[in-house]
Amino acid sequence: MTFETIIRGGTIVTASDTFSADIGISGGRITALSETLGDAPEIIDATGLLVMPGGIDSHVHLDQPGAPGIVMADTFETGTRSAAIGGNTTVLPFCLQQKGQSLRQAISDYQAKANGNCYTDIALHLIITDPAPQVLGQELPALIAEGYTSIKIFMTYDDLKLADSDILAVLDVARQHRALVMVHAEGYDAIRFLTERLEREGRTAPFFHGASRPIPVEREATHRAISFAEIVGTEAMIVHVSNRQAMEEIRRAQQRGLRIHGETCPQYLMLTEADMDRPGMEGAKYVCSPPPRDSDSQAACWEGLQQGVFEVFSSDHCPYRYEDEAGKKAPDGNNSFRYVPNGIPGIATRMPILFSEGVGKGRIDLNRFVALTSTNHAKRYGLYPRKGTIAVGSDADLVLWDATRDVVITHSLLKDGCDYTPYEGLAVRGWPVRTLLRGVTVMKDAETGSRRSGMELQRSLF
Ligand code: URP
Ligand code: ZN
Ligand code: ZN
């Protein structure tokens, strides 16, 4: 057999196995796994390194339009570049339908932003904000059949939220056409009530963002979303779960045999509400929704990862620059937390944080790390086994990982379009040293070059 590239001498880790083998690559795919393979034009020495499926981050916001005057910090170019730095080979950004817009138009707008600009492969989720009869009756079924098989809906935010009746209708289309609904579970009315009360009391600093959406707000919406999925008879993914009560709602549903899935993110393991209490506007750097909570919530999120309540670990990368009036220092943000754009960056730091805090500290094993950061995303979103594993026939999407490398996270390492990381100064052990997309190196020793060979992937039905 001949190969274009051989990765030699590494320890291969998949979601199920850990073993030593060489990997032969031809035409962008893995064509052989063997104790030893012969020669090839390119030999990559992986001695002493882990070789894992490239990371798949299934919750990412890139170049997403927001409130007037607010600009997201990452384009598809800078966001996927940072993803490759962090060991990822596929990301799934959201395609936001603007009110009144057709879904097809929304997709072609995002394709225009993405085409030719991506360092990693991508696949788009839809966000439905305007479930008009034509959208739910014709467009959505047609797009699901074309592979747009995951749809995010919001239970909060003025411009994004769906009424309960619309949530039920979207879930029903998903059931009929075999798509998966991803739910942002926070209750709009409760948040508005608490926000107005906090503002009347003059409690308007970024810290009070957390008080405007406390744990019961998320628990109630999680319970409602699960109940709606049960009533309709379909599956749902509760995204960015931040605390024990919401996690327990999901666990209970799973124990009752409902097909309810869960996702959590690094911010819910690493940050707390105290981070939003930093002086001046500094707390705005940590404003995201649901907000970071407390140490028991962190422990619960670890428990959910260890026990399988959460099947995916995603970044919810949603970057806004800090020193920027189009970002975290939006002019009205001084008057109230409600005007601080919600979301924090984290696309490059997701895997190193889970590796260091999870594998390094004995909370999860290597195989679960791979499942949570790659394999389960591929399975859940219709990309497996092309993506998310190391097997003959799969795309040669790989990350070479130095499990002994000590790194102090600092923003300049991450090569994104933001101007800060919430994890500045965090010491981690374990770091990606090389990323290959379909057999071609897209990141080596923290450099990506300018090769942007990522493409939009066709997904199979959920
Ligand atoms: O604060 C966050 N997470 N903003 C991003 C949008 C979302 O809800 O995922
Ligand atoms: Zn959300
Ligand atoms: Zn998000």
Image (cartoon, rainbow, N blue to C red):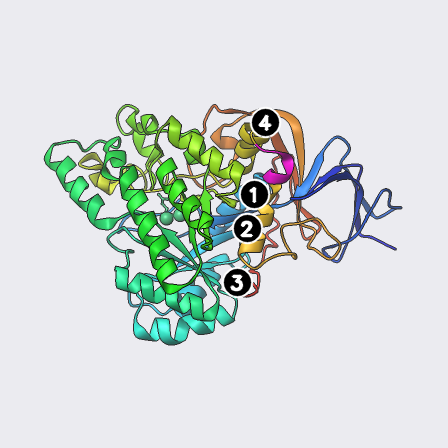
Q: Amino acid at mark 1?
A: Thr
Q: Nearer the viewer, mark 3 or mark 1?
A: 3
The residues bearing labels 2 and 4 have C-alpha atoms spaced at a distance of 23 Å
Q: Main secondary structure of the magenta part?
A: helix
Label 4, on which residue?
Answer: 362
Label 2 sits on residue: 377
Amino acid type, residue under disc 2 in the picture = His
Disc with the residue nearer the chain's start (1 vs 4): 4
Residue 6 in the image, given as x and y percentages of width and height: 80, 46
Q: Position of residue 23 (x, y in %)?
A: 78, 46
- Which x, y percent locates residue 195? 18, 40
Q: Is residue 14 left or right of residue 294?
A: right
| Amino acid beneath label 4 | Gly
> Going by the image, does 99 lie left or right of 179?
left
**Above or below 136: residue 152:** above
Query: Which numbered dot is residue 373?
Result: 1
Question: Which is in the foreground here, disc 2 or disc 4?
Answer: 4
Q: Nearer the viewer, mark 1 or mark 4?
A: 4
Label 2 with label 3: CB-CB less than 8 Å: no
> Which residue was labeled with disc 3?
462
